[in-house]
Amino acid sequence: MVESEENKSSTSTYDRVAEVKAFEESKVGVKGLLESGICVTKIPRMFHYPNLNLNMNSTHESDPSSKFNVPIIDLQNIHTNPCLHAEVLDKIRSACREWGCFQVINHGIPDSVLDEMISGIRRFHEQEAEERKPFYTRDTSKKVRYFSNGSLFKNHAANWRDTISFYVSPDPPNPEEIPQVCRDIVIEYSKKVRDLGFTFFEIFSEALGLDPSYLKKLASPNGHFIACHYYPPCPEPELTMGASNHTDGDFMTILLQDRIGGLQVLHQNQWIDVPPVHGSLIVNIGDLLQLVTNDMFTSVYHRVLSKNIGPRISIASFFVNSLSKGTSKVVGPINELLSEENPPIYRDTTVNDFLAHYYEKSLDGSSSLQPFRV
Ligand SMILES: O=C(O)CCC(=O)C(=O)O
């Protein structure tokens, strides 16, 4: 296609590096852009995804006529009713293999805790800019970090979202390091979601025919990290994304989303909406679980569309903490799952090396597991 003269001149004068630098130096993220009043109707160029419009039908929208629904798993009574237990294991096994994700209800974390976690994170992002700024950093040795776009300097287009994250295990921050507006609920939620994560590691182990403690022992020394996202309403949602297409690099992610929607997962080459269900959580299989299960469970590609309504708030609890000392642990396909018919697809690596590759590659939609295939 021949580029118009107007486009050519705006391309040649556009200084992306300067725009990104000024954005970063503001230390108040996307929310700060809206507060400053400079993007009431238009978003800055650094957020523009090239070709997003061109592929609107095939990659941006979910197909409303799709016959697929993300599986919903109900954990009610599974510990007291053996038939139900076996039935739920079957459902989880097939969801983890065919979808790489499911929604879970009756998981034991009260709605009041989920709702207050969302409110607490909203309070953090909606307090005065001067209150947020001291937390803004890219120093990954900090256990509490406020930032916008983890790969801001690498990605070609920035996502329309801000994040505050907490390294909560194995070595949590001192309570005073957590912003006061969300301190109590972050501490409470992180304990509850960690316990739920351990329950899932037990259920997954059983579903794979392993000793129930197997995956917990493998994964839990690697810690737990929580990223709390704030997706402000976007004046030009058709030009950008809330989160670009990616898989998670951890063993498992437990995700809490509010009622706005926008999360999609890739299933059989179609983008499927993950509809908000109050009180539910979403469980995503991460790349490391795909690797150790030798593809018996598969990680799921997912993304978040930006919207002109909001804000949308989500809380992603990652079962791996890239700061943890435990990450020098060697991982590879679990011996008990291998056989002559099912030889190892991946080579052994350390969690550290895998994560180094994952973060180096950034969220570009390509497979993080490819270089680890034998
Ligand atoms: O906000 C969401 O729903 C998804 C977040 C996510 O994909 C992530 O943190 O990796």
Image: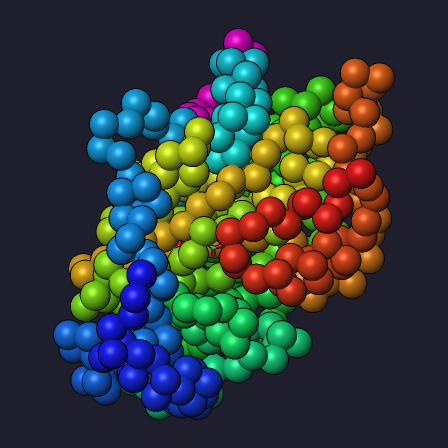
Is-magenta flag for residue 270? no
Image position, residue 314 (x, y; %)? 38, 56
Asked whether 78 falls inside the magenta stretch, the response is yes
| Color encoding of the figure | rainbow
- Tell me the residue at 80%/52% (across/down): 350
On screen, residue 155 versus residue 349, left or right, reads left
User: Where's residue 292, x and y in %?
Assistant: 73, 37
Q: Tell me the magenta residue range.
A: 73-83
Question: In which of the image's four quarters is ligand 1 placed?
Answer: bottom left
Report which quarter residue 273 is drawn in.
Answer: top left
The secondary structure making up most of the magenta span is loop
Against 206, residue 328 (above or below) is below
Q: Is residue 46 left or right of residue 140?
A: left
Residue drawn at x 51%, y 26% is 98
Image quadrant in which you'd find residue 213: top right
**Residue 2 position (above or below residue 131):** above
Horizontal relation, residue 110 to residue 215: left or right: left
Q: Nearer the viewer, residue 34 or 13?
A: 13
**Picture coordinates of residue 148 (x, y %)?**
43, 73
The quadrant of the rendering that contains the N terminus is bottom left
Residue drawn at (46%, 69%) of the image: 156
Residue 193 visible in the picture: no
| Residue at image location 43% in from the left, 56% down from the top | 244
Q: Residue furthest left?
A: 41
Image quadrant in which the C terminus is located: top right
Looking at the picture, tell me which residue is in the foreground, 191 or 318: 318
Residue 70 appears in view = yes
Image height of 195 relative to 50, above or below? above
Residue 132 place in picture, x, y as percent: 39, 82
Which residue is more in the foreground, 180 or 370? Answer: 370
